[in-house]
């Protein structure tokens, strides 16, 4: 079972190259139709994208799992490269509210256990600074991410 990360916004979210086994790295794609149908129960904004890491899924992002004191990361350099690319992707987006939803693959329709609003600068800081607690990436987090000039609903 893999972690899945979905980003949504009313602004267009550009796609990147697809995942490649020969060149694994951060990527952004359209969710599969079955994922999209399920995740729409939790994400209310128009455009939804699947965000993946070098592992081909969301498992390559640094995250604290359950009660473990340290994150499970098989390749710290690759994980940081994914985080750097994700931060660059977020900074390049138009100013608009966003949502980020993390879940186990197949559980996209399950309601989040935690909800938190953050400013995009906080999320980018976490990504760039090797932040390893649940405040950055944790299982079942739903976020409303705001830009400096965006309004939250």
Image (spheres, rainbow, N blue to C red):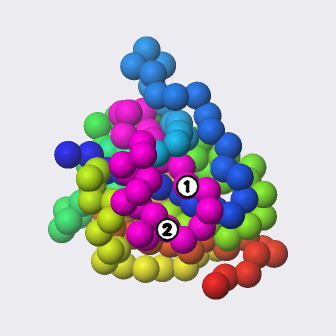
> In the shown orientation, is residue 106 left or right of residue 56?
left
Extreme bottom residue here? 153
Find out whether residue 83 is within the magenta segment.
no
Out of 49 and 122, give the one closest to the viewer. 49
Can you say which quadrant of the picture contains the C terminus?
bottom right
Q: Residue 4 location in percent, x, y?
A: 36, 51
- Label 2 environment density (alpha carbons within 10 Å; few <14, some 14–19, many ≥20): many
Out of 7 and 128, give the one closest to the viewer. 7
Q: Residue 95 location in percent, x, y?
A: 78, 64
Q: Which residue is mark 1?
A: 48
Q: Which residue is mark 2?
A: 43
Image quadrant assignment for residue 7? bottom right
Q: Residue 35 location in percent, x, y?
A: 38, 51
Secondary structure of the residue carrying tag 2 is loop
Q: Which residue appears at 29% of the width and 37% of the height?
A: 74
Q: Which residue appears at 61% of the width and 34% of the height?
A: 16
């Amino acid at each position: 079972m893999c972690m899945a990360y979905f980003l949504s916004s009313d602004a267009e979210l550009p796609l990147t190259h697809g995942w490649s086994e020969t060149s694994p790295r951060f990527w952004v794609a359209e969710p599969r139709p079955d994922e999209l149908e399920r995740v729409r129960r939790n994400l209310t904004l128009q455009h939804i994208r699947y965000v993946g890491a070098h592992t081909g899924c969301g498992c390559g992002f640094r995250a604290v799992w359950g009660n473990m004191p340290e994150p499970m990361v098989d390749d710290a350099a690759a994980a940081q490269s994914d985080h750097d690319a994700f931060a660059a992707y977020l900074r390049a987006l138009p100013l608009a509210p966003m949502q980020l939803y993390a879940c186990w693959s197949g559980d996209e329709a399950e309601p989040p256990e935690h909800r938190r609003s953050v400013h995009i600068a906080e999320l980018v800081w976490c990504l760039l600074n090797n932040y390893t607690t649940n405040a950055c990436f944790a299982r079942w987090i739903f976020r409303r991410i705001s830009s400096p000039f965006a309004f939250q609903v």
